[in-house]
Image (cartoon, grey):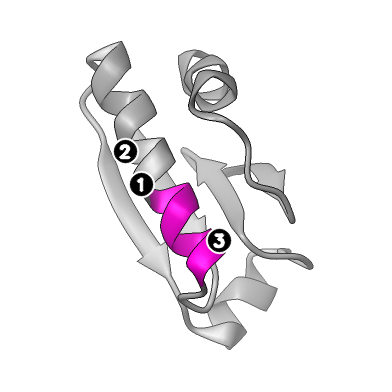
Amino acid sequence: MKIEIYGTGCAKCKRLTQAAEQAARELGVDYELEKVEDLDAIVAAGVMRTPALAVDGVLRVSGQLPSVSALREILAG
């Protein structure tokens, strides 16, 4: 599973990264995490609000910071 975190490195982006990693570990899934901080790449991915999270190329969260339990549901898919 590929998890992408879109954001410029703000505090919320960092918290989303930590929460997504925690959720993936709790699920016991193999994952690759990529942080995308380049504004052109963020816009090219269709992200209008950060922080955002994509799973396997599908944008699942934008402009919010979901709980670890909500992220587990998203990642379990």
Kindly tell me whether residue 6 is visible in this rendering.
Answer: no
Q: Would you place residue 44 above or below residue 14 in this image?
A: below
Amino acid on which the number 2 mark rests in the picture: Glu
Query: Decide: marks 3, 2 in contact (CB < 8 A)?
Result: no
Read off the magenta span. Answer: 11-17
Residue in the image at 61% along x and 60% along y = 51
Q: Which mark is residue 18?
A: 1
Residue of label 2 = 21
**Quadrant assignment, res 40:** bottom right
| Identity of the residue drawn at 25% across and 43% down | 32
Tell me which label, 3 or 2, sits earlier in the chain: 3
In percent of width and height, residue 50 lies at 67, 65
Closer to us: 9 or 3: 9
Q: Amino acid at mark 1?
A: Gln
Tag 2–tag 1 contact (CB < 8 Å): yes
Residue 5 visible, this angle: yes
Check residue 15 for magenta coloring. yes
* Residue of label 3: 12
How far apart in space, not on screen, are marks 3 and 1 (Cα)? 10 Å
Q: Secondary structure at mark 2?
A: helix
- Quarter the C terminus occupies: top right
Instruction: Examine the rendered structure and indicate whether residue 67 appears above or below residue 49.
Output: above
Does the segment drawn in magenta span residue 27? no
